[in-house]
Image (tube, rainbow, N blue to C red):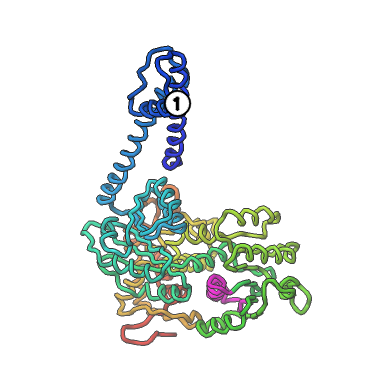
Amino acid sequence: MWWTSAQWYFLGIAAAAAFILGIVGFRQWNASVGTWNASFLDNAYLSLELFVLGSGAVEPPIPLPLEIARFLAPVVSVYGAAAGIATLLGERISLWRLKRARRHAVICGLNQEGLLLAETLVSEATQVAFIDDAPDEWALARAKSLGITVIVGDPCDSESLRLAAVGRARVLVAICPDDGKNADIAVRASEIPRPSRAPSLAVYVHVLDTELCTLLKEHALTSETVDRVSVDFFSIPENGARAMLDTVPLRSRHEGQAPHILVVGLGKLGRSLLVQAARQYWFENTDIGSKLCVTAIDKTAESKVALLLLRYPALSESCEITALSMERESPEFEQAAYLYGSDGQRHVDAVYICPDDDVHALVSAMTLHKHTRAAGVPIAVRMSDERGLAELVKTVSGEHNLHSVGMLDQACAKDALRNSTREWIARAIHSEYVKHELMTGVSQADNPSMAPWNELPLDLKESNRCQADDIKSKIADLGMDVTPSPDWTQDAFTFSEEQVELLAQREHDRWMVERVEAGWSYAPGPKDLEKKTSPYLVPWDDLAEVDKDKDRNAMRAIPAILARAGYSVIEFDSKPVKN
């Protein structure tokens, strides 16, 4: 609460007022009674004694200032002592509660990013603890106002982690500014023993470098858990790129043609957005037969695009990239001839402004807004957060085609923990499900579970995530494994029908357990999301063939789903298997 930090300011003002009123009051009393000629220092001393009930018992008449001071000073003393004791005991009680906590979250790094994560977790009724060796005063005050326990210590120190009861925690987030420190925290947390009744610990490690984060995430699914501790990685620029693509989706304004997007700025965010857009378009629009068109603008666009093509060879097969090396403050950028084709028509369908600086991003957005406003071309502009300049973007965007995307708010506050390897696969599972339902003639009106991912109820999202968690185990049962594969254009492995049947039955059994634990029950008739009833909560042998086919199709899609997330299926001790 705001009073926790503000109370000391009010207490200081009240103490000063009591002291001054006491001096004035004693001076007036001495003048009226005339017992002795007290000096200023005498009156000041008597006024100070009021705080310990030492000088207030005087003969009437008592002046009003002294009357107020006689009661205000002791109140200040008592309240100050009580508040101090409460603060001391509060920290002790908070640590005591933390030692007995279970399924709580520990965040290493008391900074703006960590606070946004903490606010989200607290809003979900999750107990949170911070560890930081040198927290800023404002961040410390904010954390305490949220009722969060703060441990001032080195988060890489095992003792600090034990003090935060990491052994019984459900989530640990390492979000310090140093990538190496975050990695060290993950290692130390994995070494702490976990009681038998403690939940599994999900460790999320922030990695600022997007290329390194991609490599680490690609290995996250293939890594074995250690003593019920799983480690995954996330990057704010990478998550921000996903948020921008969710805000302004890849859509062509010309039927039958591939979208043409403009990416301004090829820093960490811009490069990640370009790769994610290419991968997403490849899997969602293979029937069009044309490549995604990309115009990329940066001071050194040509060299950065050339490097991307070396790192991701699939880019050349899935999109056509035009690299324009120009300054954002140049006549060429201001004239915006790159928005138009040789026929003089505006060909760009969406614009993504990705500079790391808010001012430069806003200037670039406003420049392009002038050229695209009449055509209603949507523009997503990167902002640090949803306040300040981002509010200005919303103000000037009267036609709703200029969208600010706050990196910290969108990519860190709510979805940072969910935009991990697990989330990639979960979203791909949902996309494949929707795609199959549409092919069979089912619409969202017939099946509410086909809603876009961002509109999907939380329990259905969790269902997809649980299915993603079980994929590696399913594949291992077949004597196979998964391996990172940055080439999303290669053919996916195909299971035999016998393998599909085994996987489908296992998936149905897993799904039934997961649904029952989530509060669902069997009921005939259509599935009811509100009542949590389903006609499919029956043993595999009692399931209709048409419903069994849904599980079979989901299992057949596993290799394609993994390919969407950057993996391919392999047999143990063999090379990746293709069609």
Q: In the displayed structure, would residue 54 be above or below residue 325?
A: above
Quarter holding residue 109: bottom left
Please, which residue is most extreme toward the left here?
196
Q: Is residue 79 left or right of residue 158?
A: right
Q: Which residues are magenta?
A: 266-292
Q: Position of residue 527 (x, y in %)?
A: 44, 53
Quarter holding residue 222: bottom left
Q: Position of residue 294 (x, y in %)?
A: 63, 76
Is residue 408 inside the magenta stretch? Answer: no
Quarter holding residue 463: bottom left
Q: Residue at x 40, y 85 (%)?
A: 577
Q: In the displayed structure, would residue 482 be above or below residue 533?
A: below
Please, which residue is most extreme toward the front here?
37
Q: Residue at x 33, y 35 (%)?
A: 81
Is residue 291 inside the magenta stretch? Answer: yes
Q: Position of residue 207 (x, y in %)?
A: 43, 69
Amino acid identity at mark 1: Ile
Given residues 288 and 41, the one toward you in this image is 41
Q: Quick one: quadrant of the N terminus?
A: top left
- Residue 440 visible, this orientation: no
Q: How many marks?
A: 1
- Residue 391 visible, this orientation: yes
Q: Is residue 383 left or right of residue 513?
A: right
Q: In the displayed structure, would residue 360 be above or below residue 309?
A: above
| Mark 1, other Cα within 10 Å: few <14 / some 14–19 / many ≥20 | many
Q: Quick one: quadrant of the C terminus?
A: bottom left
Given residues 568 and 416, the one toward you in this image is 416
Q: Say which element carries label 1.
A: helix
Given residues 233 and 480, the one toward you in this image is 233
Which residue is label 1 attached to? 23
Report the magenta stretch's main SS.
helix
Q: Position of residue 564 (x, y in %)?
A: 47, 74
